[in-house]
Amino acid sequence: RALDLLLILTAWRLHNPEALLTDTTLIMLGIVALSFELTAALSGLYVSHRSRNLSHLLFRTTVTVVIAFGVLIFFSYLSGRLLALTPKQVLIPWLMTTLLLMLGVRLLYRPVLGILRKWGLNQRSAGIVGDSTSANTLRIRLQKNPWMGITVQQSYSLSQRDAFLTAARQGRYDQIYLALPLCEQAAVQDLIAELADTSCSVYLVPDVFTFDLLNARTE
């Protein structure tokens, strides 16, 4: 978050190297920073993207920047004082430079984090509940993609429920994946309720095989 705010200020300075930080300029920068932070919170820009593709992160970044500057444009036209300081020849280059800096930083640190995770750094431990096809597929994919930084510590079947809950409550896992068939929805709800007092992030893995049998689809 602090780096993104610094990039906004840096982009402004690149196009206004001799401008003084007057009260009006600070208000303008504050509008962009505040609207960016609020939009980032609503769009989930700062949630973990380790298991999502890069294009998803870049898209959210682009949307957040455009909305933040859109708010500034709105206030600029409401106040002639702000409009005088943010003409099109300054505002548009500032927006584009900010966007390019933020996208560039994300394009750079994503591969760096991937390398660090392959070396065993910045890891998150995971537990998988279920012995379905979806559970096996998930485990194999996580093991084959170490750049995600998710290490599968152990897999459990429903018969190992108590052992799993004990391990989860002891803080052995950062993330838990429930990969149970549709017929075990009662067990899924029970596990979610039992995990409510832990710090684990719980994810539901859809039973794709059963979905195929039912000729089901999601939208």
Image (tube, grey):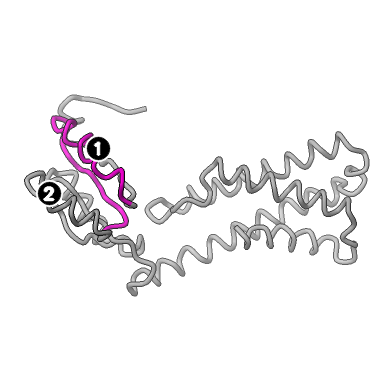
Residue at the spot of label 2: 162
Left or right: where 216 falls relative to 56? left
Between tags 2 and 1, which lies in front?
A: 2
Q: Position of residue 205 (x, y in %)?
A: 25, 41
Q: Position of residue 127 (x, y in %)?
A: 22, 54
Q: Tell me if mark 2 has few (under 14), some (14-19) or many (20+) residues whose alpha carbon lies within 10 angstroms of its own.
A: few
Task: From this view, report whether residue 41 is shown above or below residue 149.
Answer: above
Q: Name the element at disc 1.
A: loop
Q: Tell me if mark 1 has few (under 14), some (14-19) or many (20+) residues whose alpha carbon lies within 10 angstroms of its own.
A: some
Q: Quadrant of residue 154?
A: bottom left
Left or right: where 119 falls relative to 16? left
Confirm whether the magenta stretch covers residue 175.
yes
Residue stretch rendered in magenta on the structure: 173-198
Left or right: where 37 falls relative to 187? right
Dominant SS type (magenta)? helix
Q: Position of residue 210 (x, y in %)?
A: 16, 32
Q: Position of residue 110 (x, y in %)?
A: 47, 63
Q: Residue at x 58, y 49 (%)?
A: 61
14 or 159, which lies in front?
A: 159
Residue at the spot of label 1: 206
Which amino acid, mark 1?
Pro
Q: Name the element at disc 2.
A: helix
Q: Residue at x 82, y 49 (%)?
A: 27
Q: Residue at x 17, y 39 (%)?
A: 180
Work out whether mark 2 precedes mark 1 in sequence or the reverse, and give the earlier one.
2
* Quadrant occupied by the C terminus: top left
Which amino acid, mark 2?
Asp
